[in-house]
Image (cartoon, helix red, strand yellow):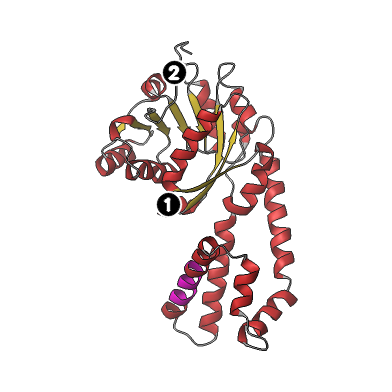
Amino acid sequence: MSTESTTAGNGARIALFGAGKIGEALLAGLLSAGRSSDDVVFVEPSGERSAEMTHRYGVRAVDAAEAARTADLVVLAVKPPAAAPLLDGLDELRDGTLVVSLCAGVSTEALQAHLPTGSPVVRVMPNTPMLVGEGMSAVSPGAHATEEHLALVEEMMRSVGRVVRVPESQQDAVTAISGSGPAYLFLVVEALVEAGVALGLPRPVATELATQTAVGAAHMARDSGEHPALLREAVTSPGGTTAAALAQLEAHGLRTAFAVATRAARDRSAALGTPDSAGTSSPAG
């Protein structure tokens, strides 16, 4: 790999490897946040997909060698098993290039093993609501990532939602809560829709009631500043309908179910994050 060094700053040139849903969401977010299309390129093996992305966003598709040669920041938005082979093939990657991984379960240590000594790596656990600009991302530094690198990655991920910084040791727990979390909430919405239909509501009406209720409740939980327990209590009148429903949810072990489920997700994430996970793991989901 080249020994030319580079400094990642606010105007860093970004090379995005992978133009799937997550890669496209990040690209769209960067452009919406004011990033120039001249400062972003992407690598995508499908010619049809490349043409579609270029037409839609005005961003150039390049080959891996050009991306490695010109980028200050390389984003891996590929399936986890593809990460190690991809890095091994980037002979023209410049020393000091910041590598950002969106690959679930792949540790910074595993990625650093495929890079020159001292390469900065930042690991990110995003989630699918980034597709609508409401993502939740957790970032963790590798051994050689600086405060400047972290700030740059946080700025990038804020283009598609919110960001928290956590030690890498907590990434498996993050995966269990926010990484896999959208699926839990989709299941809750699905269950509410089916319950509404069972109670006699037309399916379109039940769907709108359940989805908008979820949206509104989420905004209140995020923006009100109140603890979720206080928000729940404000809806729950003594002896009322909500109290009757909540009593049944508690009786059927809702809290225990979430505790057991998230523990299983965390343990699965940890199992995927083995020392050679950059070559063997699969996406969380």
**Mark 2 — residue?**
6
The earlier-in-sequence mark between 1 and 2 is 2
Image coordinates of residue 227 in percent, x first then y, are 62, 65
Q: Which residue is mark 1?
A: 131
Please indicate whether residue 70 sits to the left or right of residue 229 in the image.
Answer: left
- Camera-nearest residue between 150 and 277: 150
* Mark sitting on residue 80: none
Q: CA distance from mark 1 to mark 2?
A: 31 Å
Task: List x then y, in percent, for residue 252.
Answer: 73, 75
User: Callout 2, which amino acid?
Assistant: Thr
Does the magenta segment cover residue 209? yes
Q: Secondary structure at mark 1?
A: helix
Q: Main secondary structure of the magenta part?
A: helix
Quarter assignment of residue 184: bottom right
Magenta range is 207-215
Viewer-nearest of labels 1 and 2?
Answer: 2
Q: Residues within 10 Å of mark 1 (few under 14, many from 20)?
A: some
Q: Say whether residue 279 is left or right of residue 261.
A: left
Q: Residue at x 65, y 69 (%)?
A: 229
* Residue 116 placement (x, y as % from top left): 56, 16
Q: SS class of the residue under badge 2?
A: loop
Q: Report x, y in % for residue 96.
A: 50, 19
Q: Is residue 255 left or right of residue 232?
A: right
Tell me what residue is drawn at x 44 percent, y 18 percent: 6
Q: Nearer the viewer, residue 46 or 265?
A: 265
